[in-house]
Image (cartoon, helix red, strand yellow):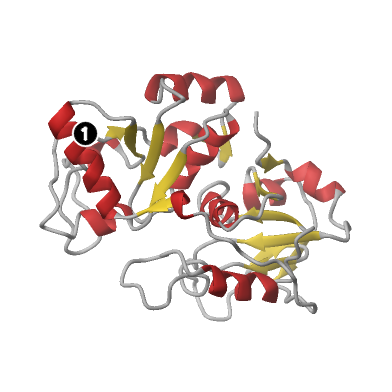
Amino acid sequence: MNKATVTCQWLKDHLDDENLVILDASMPEPRASDSAVIHAIKGAQAFDYANIVCDQSASLPCTMPSAEYFTQQAQQLGVNTNSTLIVYDQRGLFYAPRAWWMFKSMGFKQVYVLDGGLPKWQESNFPLQQGYVKSVIRGNFVAKFECTAFVGSNEILATVKEYQSLQASDNVVIDVRSRARFDGTEKETRAGLRSGHIPFSENFPFTLLIENGEFISEVEQRELLTRYMPDAHKKYTFSCGSGVTACIVLLSAYMQGYENLCVYDGSWTDWGANTELPIAEG
């Protein structure tokens, strides 16, 4: 396997490592009040890719920013080229894989997802803090964006047209939403979105890979990937609602040795809103 996750015990044992940077990549959740306490792992900083570390001019949520802007934000977090970066989220394993892929796409290699996230950490009675810390140093990491890590609707449409003309393609779109959303039997919660899926895409719900906020066993992951993504040599583009949970399946595939992987940035929020783009149901 390609190592891309760490356990809570590993993080606990390395909390005092000099080069360690811990980021809570959760999306802001509704709180009972503005004064409600945010619990975080000791030493964690906030990494808000929904509102801060994103393209501020984009109309779609969580859009990837430029390498220059990403560099600025990463350096403010104290990220150095020799840092070991751990990303986690407050739901276990949900938001953090997106942050992991963002850093990977920007050329940062020593980044890992905390399997089980904050719930597992709390369950283990490991050190917590109220709120987040801020780095007192400026990092030296400089991002270099790998443009093939994220694609837009034009690349997806080209794949659809290839299927239409050849009835085959080396590019496969994997939709990780629920089967009901994929089939179009469940309406989208975002206003203005059509129901259904990208023509010729395959459905692989991300929830199949997770149990109690953690990845299922390596053997079980491998069995699912072999079933839904049988040809490891093809290019797989992952899509979801907004480009977040797509990274969960991508992370699993990466760990199992799949190499040609990318995310449809914008995903169904982009495709479903554009009436000029084709959809399929059922």
Q: Which residue is drawn at 54% across and 54% down?
A: 105
- Relative placement, left or right, of 197 versus 244 is left
* Vertical order, 166 against 70 (above or below): above
Q: Mark 1 points at which residue?
A: 200
Disc 1 element: loop
Residue 171, image quadrant: top left
Q: What residue type is labelled 1?
A: Phe
Q: Residue at x 51, y 75 (%)?
A: 52
Please name whichever residue, 269 or 262, is drawn nearer the observer in this view of the structure: 262
**Is 233 left, or right, of 127 in this rendering?**
left
Q: In this view, does 69 lie above or below 128?
A: below
Q: For the C terminus, which image quadrant?
A: top left
Answer left or right for 64 relative to 48.
left
Res. 37 visible in picture: no
Graded by Cα atoms within 10 Å as few (under 14), some (14 to 19) or many (20 or more), the crowding at tag 1 reads some
Measuring from the top left, give residue 142's x and y in whole percent. Answer: 66, 67
Foreground of the two, 155 or 84: 155
| Quadrant assignment for the N terminus | top right
| Residue drawn at the location 68% of the way across and 76% of the way down | 76
Q: Is residue 207 visible?
A: yes
Up the image or down, 14 lies above or below 128; here it is above
Q: Where is residue 159 in the image (x, y as percent from the top left)?
A: 25, 40
Q: Position of residue 222 (x, y in %)?
A: 53, 22
- Quarter of image, res 161: top left
The quarter holding residue 17 reads bottom right
Q: Residue at x 27, y 54 (%)?
A: 153
Q: Residue 168's spot in the image, x, y percent? A: 23, 26
111, 89: nearer the viewer: 111
Image check: 84 left or right of 159? right
